[in-house]
Amino acid sequence: MTAPISQDALNQLFLNARTHNAWTDAEVPDALLRELVDIVKMGPTSANCSPARIVFVKSDAAKNRLKPFLSEGNLEKTMSAPVCAIIGHDLEFYEHMAKLFPHNKDSRYWFEGDPEKILETAFRNGTLQGAYFLIAARALGLDTGPMSGFDKAGVDEEFFAGTKVRSNFLCNLGHGDPSVLLPRSPRFDFGEIAQIL
């Protein structure tokens, strides 16, 4: 039986973790980004379809490519973040099913010719992997700043041209500056969002 993780771990992942908008100058090494992806890819997806695709926007040149597509409210915090990850999903994920789900050679054909099922599966599972990304980043000692507020079509054309990858959300990464955090926003009570039958 799996043991619960420690209270300290829960605090780091959820209870004390915050969405950051301001960042220190501490670098995020490429090796840490690779480790992050190696953790994210282990999270479960439908039939192991693994549609998430991630672009780490880190260099000044890459940030300048992203800059025109950011909303005004997301501009400064993204440009000052050590890294901004574009979390996307591949609408041709099913082309890799023979590799990812090898015990069922017909799994590719579950999706072929059904664009609605493809979109639903890619978006749902890519979003799941995006959530794993946030948790894994926090587990590795990074702070996160997930956000909408960008021109998706522009980002897709700039970073995913010639592919069937579509962006979902952006996530700034680094070591946040806690001195500028606002008070935590309220959350629902159990009975407002859940029930036990």
Image: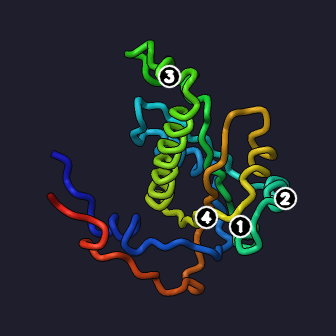
**Where residue 149 sits in the image (x, y, percent)?**
68, 65
Q: Left or right: where does residue 159 sit relative to residue 193?
A: right
Q: Which mark is residue 2?
A: none
**Of marks 4 and 1, which one's residue comes earlier in the chain?**
1
The answer to whether marks 2 and 1 mark residues whose Cβ atoms lie closer than 8 Å is: no
- Residue bearing mark 1: 78
Q: Secondary structure at mark 3?
A: helix
The answer to whether marks 1 and 3 mark residues whose Cβ atoms lie closer than 8 Å is: no
What residue sits 62% from the left and 74% below the top? 21
- Residue bearing mark 3: 97
Q: Nearer the viewer, mark 1 or mark 3?
A: 3
What residue sits 41% from the left and 29% below the top? 47
Q: Nearer the viewer, residue 153 or 4?
A: 153
Q: Above or below — where is 188 with respect to 148?
A: below
Q: Amino acid at mark 4?
A: Met
Q: CA distance from mark 1 to mark 3?
A: 35 Å
Q: Is residue 123 visible?
A: yes
Q: Is residue 35 visible?
A: no
Q: Nearer the viewer, residue 155 or 99?
A: 155
Q: Nearer the viewer, mark 2 or mark 3?
A: 3
- Residue bearing mark 2: 64
Q: Nearer the viewer, mark 4 or mark 1?
A: 4
- Quadrant location, the C terminus: bottom left
Q: CA distance from mark 4 to mark 3?
A: 30 Å
Q: Nearer the viewer, mark 4 or mark 2?
A: 4
**Where residue 63 sits in the image (x, y, percent)?**
79, 58
Q: Residues within 10 Å of mark 1 (few under 14, many from 20)?
A: many
The answer to whether marks 2 and 3 mark residues whose Cβ atoms lie closer than 8 Å is: no
Q: CA distance from mark 2 to mark 1?
A: 11 Å
**Of marks 1 and 3, which one's residue comes earlier in the chain?**
1
**Where residue 177 sits in the image (x, y, percent)?**
59, 79
The answer to whether marks 4 and 1 mark residues whose Cβ atoms lie closer than 8 Å is: yes
